[in-house]
Amino acid sequence: MGHAAHPQKLEDPGKIKLPSWYFGLAGVLAIVGFGTFAWALGQDAHRAWGSYLMGFFFFLSVALAGAFFVAVNYLTSAGWSVAVRRVPEAMTAFLLPAAVLAVGVFFGSHELYHWAHEGVTDTDMLLLHKAPYLNMTRMGIFVAVAFVIWIVLIGWITANSRQQDKTGESKLTQKNTYLSAVYMLLFALTFSTVGIDFLMSLEPHWFSTMWAVYLFSMLMQVGYATMVLSVVLLRRTGKLDAFVNEGHVHDLGKMMFAFTVFWAYIAFSQFLLIWYANLPEETAFYLKRLDHGWAYVSLALPLLKFVVPFLILLPRNAKHNPSVLIPMCIWIFLVTGMEYYWIVMPAVTHHGPQVPWVEALVFCGFLGVFLGAYGFALSRHGIVPIKDPRLADSVHHHLV
């Protein structure tokens, strides 16, 4: 805080101008993706809605990862991250269209959720006991409350951050610290219930007490991949030369590496605890994913999602080398998409894996919406929080 006056002496880089083709590409992706979804509804509704759920939850996770990064850095008074904060702030812009897209999941509930069918509890006593929780009214209320909390609190925090660019008031940083404390507590509760509602309830007889943490590990791994890729590409514009250096990229790369390891730890722990207990109501999830050809996907996931990025990102120089980071970020996107495919499709389609061209194209539709929201938020405001009192700490953060 001793450098509070210094950031104002730095030249404001202003707004970032995205390439002219950027929003056109986002629009094409959205049209192709949702057009494919509409076509697939007439061919295989279960596969269409499964693809929809995969794309929706993937990019919801990316947006929430940005919100988590912003909140945790305010809460810990972190100075190093200030210069790159506009990237995760822009990632949260997808939360508003995600709230609208969430309604689609409810329209597809009969194809996605066995427990959503009327009269299912008449022949299934276990679902009868779970009926107070597993019902669309309760799920709709919980999801709506979650989105209101996320959009209001993160919207408030980002609005304060952008207001500070105009006023320079340090009290806005303090206010965001308090708001971040509230957000972090509510995020833990809401993300847990939303993860159970949208994904774990695809297997209504199954449960895992580690599910929320497992989804969180996926969220942070792909979230950091998004931030790393964005910062590396934005540095090439030259707008961030005075603010972002290899030290920032290295720290983001380290966090992406760390959550790669964390994902492996949580994923294996969940599998091990369920497998050695050998309780039928718990092992059903993994048994289904070891049958009808899914075993190949199950065995490939640890190799592709942990071993490959772990070995490639392990060297120190790899964590700030764009030639390594860019392909690794894209790799993490792809294998995380594969993991959502592994989570959703065995429960929805009840057959073995297929060439996922429908899933990939529908995923592109959500990618287009995300890119549109993200690009709009990123280009609308200054690319650096120029009057944040901790910006000097961030500018002087270097690779050691």
Image (cartoon, rainbow, N blue to C red):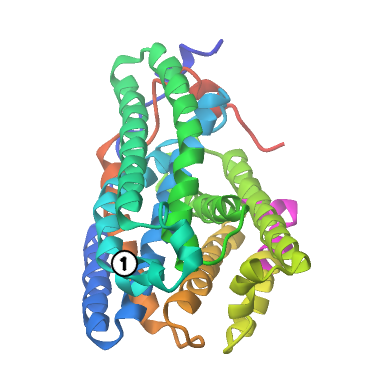
Left or right of residue 38: residue 118:
right
Residue drawn at x 28%, y 35% as measured from the top left: 381
Q: Quadrant of the C terminus?
A: top right
Assess whether residue 203 is covered by the magenta stretch. no
**Residue 71: x %, y % from top left:** 48, 32
95 lies above or below 46:
above
299 lies above or below 192:
below
Which residue appears farthest toward the right when viewing the image? Answer: 276
Residue drawn at x 78%, y 66% as measured from the top left: 276
Tally of numbered discs:
1
- Residue 322 appearing in the image: yes
Amino acid on which disc 1 is placed: Ser
Q: Nearer the viewer, residue 185 or 35?
A: 185
Left or right of residue 314: residue 356:
left
Find disc 1 in the rendering and name its residue: 109
SS of the residue under disc 1: helix
Q: Nearer the viewer, residue 57 or 389?
A: 57
> Which image quadrant is residue 218 in?
bottom right
| Magenta-drawn segment | 308-320
Q: Nearer the viewer, residue 234 or 308?
A: 308
**Residue 23: x %, y % from top left:** 23, 58
Q: How packed is label 1: few (under 14 Cα within 10 Å), some, or many (20 or more)?
A: some
Q: Quadrant of the N terminus?
A: top right
Residue drawn at x 64%, y 66% as measured from the top left: 282
Residue drawn at x 28%, y 72% as measured from the top left: 33
Tell me which secondary structure the magenta stretch mostly adopts.
Answer: helix
Q: Nearer the viewer, residue 129 or 72?
A: 129
**Residue 287: x %, y % from top left:** 64, 78
85 lies above or below 364:
above
Left or right of residue 114: residue 328:
right
